[in-house]
Amino acid sequence: ESEPIYSNVKVELQKKGVIMLPIDEAVHKYPDMMKEYFMKIFPASDHKFSALHGALWSGGVFVYVPKNVKITTPVEGFFIIGSELEGQFEHTLLIADENSYIHFIEGCTAPQFKKYSFHDGMVELYAKKNAHIKFTTIQNWSKNVINFNNKRAWADENSTVEWVEGSLGSKYSFVYPSTILRGKNASSTSLVVTMTSGEGEWKDSGSKMIHAAPYTKSKVVNKNIGFNGGVNVYRGLIRISKGAIQSKAFVKCDSLMLDDKTKAYTYPHNQVLEEDADVAHEAHTFRMNEDQLFYLMTRGVDEKEATSMLVLGFIDEIMKELPFEYATMLNKVIKLELDKLGAVA
């Protein structure tokens, strides 16, 4: 249940030396690379769910982008949980060599089953010197999926890692994309949006940025939407290690609650070991703005459409980072979820 059901690599990319194949095949075809990189950023010893993944992983994607190769069109991989009472333990390993660029889009979904399914996937990204990786994930799980994400990147000198995550559906979801900025002038951003739409739903999200080298930069933007008694939790870590002089970090976590039953919690954690570091944190919790809603309704927009417009405006900062077709899909899914607003969960 972890095999990619669709992947797209154009012939011209293969001619440039780009490698993209199921990770099971990569074990046999590229054993030295697998030995060097597989579960090295995210070892099995990290926590119990990484240990479980290390024991049971199957399927996934291996991608290697050679030096000086810039892929201008997104590369895509999709995963689906096809039956109930199943576990999905796919592993995505992406290596961007020096001065390369890739935008990888990962899609995850599951149809509606009567019984639970479990997802414990892992993503490891290696951005070498001057490389740029953008990793986008759109998850649209059914409501009986328990979802754990293990995502970590390694950013060398002058490299850039971008995380963009839309996490919808599931009963419980834990999403923490992280980057270790280990090279001078490395930078990373993390943009995450989550939504809970019913009582008993729990979304735990956030990002970890480890500044381990001088002049590194990070930006984290987390947007949580909740209604019908759902719970959203932000947990984040910014660590400015000793020696990471003149590093900068900015964190913004916003929660939008559409009713009185919903809860939102924020647990930021900042560890700053250099005096000249610049670390800023913002946290806001919003209710639906009745004045804005009234204004739109006086202009002929019905209440449901007005609510959708305000919610989509709340996450516009993340939506605009998605390719058009994915932004459109996420737009439609959010509107479908908002149809449940005020309904019995």
Image (cartoon, rainbow, N blue to C red):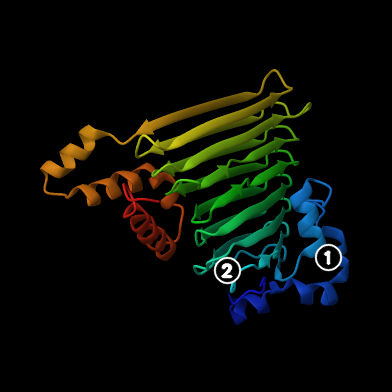
Q: Which residue is mark 1?
A: 34
> Residue 277, located in which quarter of the rendered image?
top right
User: Up-down: is 303 above or below 241?
Assistant: below
Taking 192 as reference, is 96 left or right? right
Of the pair 64 and 85, the residue shown nearer to us: 85
Q: Residues within 10 Å of mark 2 (few under 14, many from 20)?
A: some
Q: How many marks?
A: 2
Of the pair 202 and 124, the residue shown nearer to us: 202
Residue at 60% across, 31% down:
249
**Residue 88: which disc?**
none
User: Up-down: is 70 above or below 177?
Assistant: below
Of the numbered discs 2 and 1, the one sitting upstream in the chain is 1
Q: Which residue is mark 2?
A: 75
Badge 1 amino acid:
Met
CA gap, disc 2 and disc 1:
21 Å
Taking 85 as reference, is 62 left or right? right
Give the structural element (helix, strand or loop) at label 1: helix
